[in-house]
Image (cartoon, helix red, strand yellow):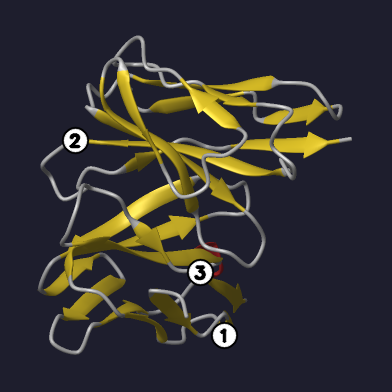
Amino acid sequence: KNEVEQSPQNLTAQEGEFITINCSYSVGISALHWLQQHPGGGIVSLFMLSSGKKKHGRLIATINIQEKHSSLHITASHPRDSAVYICAVLPNFGNEKLTFGTGTRLTIIP
Amino acid sequence: DGGITQSPKYLFRKEGQNVTLSCEQNLNHDAMYWYRQDPGQGLRLIYYSQIVNDFQKGDIAEGYSVSREKKESFPLTVTSAQKNPTAFYLCASSMLGSGANVLTFGAGSRLTVL
C-alpha cells in the first residue's frame, strides 16, 4: 500500500463545475504539498500546508492532520485547469524527502 | 528570472551508453533532487544533495550517479547499468529547513532508450 493515496485517479468535468481531489496518507507528516503537472511535464508547486486551509485564486487546499487527509478544491473550473494534480507529503522523521502520490488527472471540458 | 533549467528536454540513447542530464538552478537553494517519473507511479527519488560535494542515495539509485561540485549544478548520469532507463526525469530544489517549502521543479528531461 502506498504511503500516499489520491482519489480519484481520473476526473472529467464540465467547465464551471466545483472540483475536489483527495489525498490520504499513512505517516505522520510535517507538511503536505499540492503540485500541478501540465502536459509538457513541468511541475508547479501550488500549496504547502501544515494545518488548516489555504486559498489562492480559485484554488483552495485543506488539511486535517488528525484524519491524515487533505483536499484540493477548484471553484468555477476552466479548461486551463486540465492537468495532473499531485499530492506529496514530508514525513516528520528524517531529512527533507518527499513521498508522492500517483496523481489525479483532471480534464475540464468546455 | 530565477528557476531551474534542465537539459536536454528530449534525449535518445542506445543500449550500453551512458548519458548525462543537466540541472542548473539560480535560486541559491541548498538542496537539489533528482526524481524519476513512470506512467501510473508517483515520483521516485533517485539522489539528493543538501550541500556541495555531498549527496545521498534515494530510493532507486542503482544505475545512476550524480555530482555536486557547485551549489548551482546537480547533473545526473544514467549509466548502462540502469536496466530500464526510459522515463521522465525531474530535477527539483528547495531551501533547507523550510519543510521543503519554496519547492521548485525543472521542466523535465524525457529519456528514451532505443
Callout 3: chain: A
**Secondary element type, mark 1:** strand
Q: Nearer the viewer, residue B58 or B98?
A: B58
Same subunit under labels 3 and 1? Answer: yes
Q: Which residue is mark 3?
A: A103
Q: CA distance from mark 2 to mark 3?
A: 24 Å
Question: Residue tagged by mark 1?
Answer: A13
Q: Find disc 2 in the rendering and name its residue.
A: B95
Work out whether residue A90 or residue A79 is closer to the camera in this orientation and state it.
A90
- Residue beneath the point at 21% across and 78% down: A62
Q: Amino acid at mark 3?
A: Gly
Q: Position of residue A16 (x, y in %)?
A: 47, 83
* Mark 3 closeness class: few <14, some 14–19, many ≥20 residues within 10 Å: many
Where does residue B11 sit, x and y in percent of width and height? 74, 28
- Of residues B7 and B58, which is closer to you in this image? B58
* x 29%, y 16%: residue: B71
Residue at the image point whose x is 36% and y is 28% from the top: B3
Q: CA distance from mark 3 to mark 1?
A: 17 Å
Judged from the image, the secondary structure of the residue bearing numbered disc 2 is: loop
Q: Quadrant of the C terminus of chain A?
A: bottom right
Nearer mark to the viewer, of 1 and 2? 2
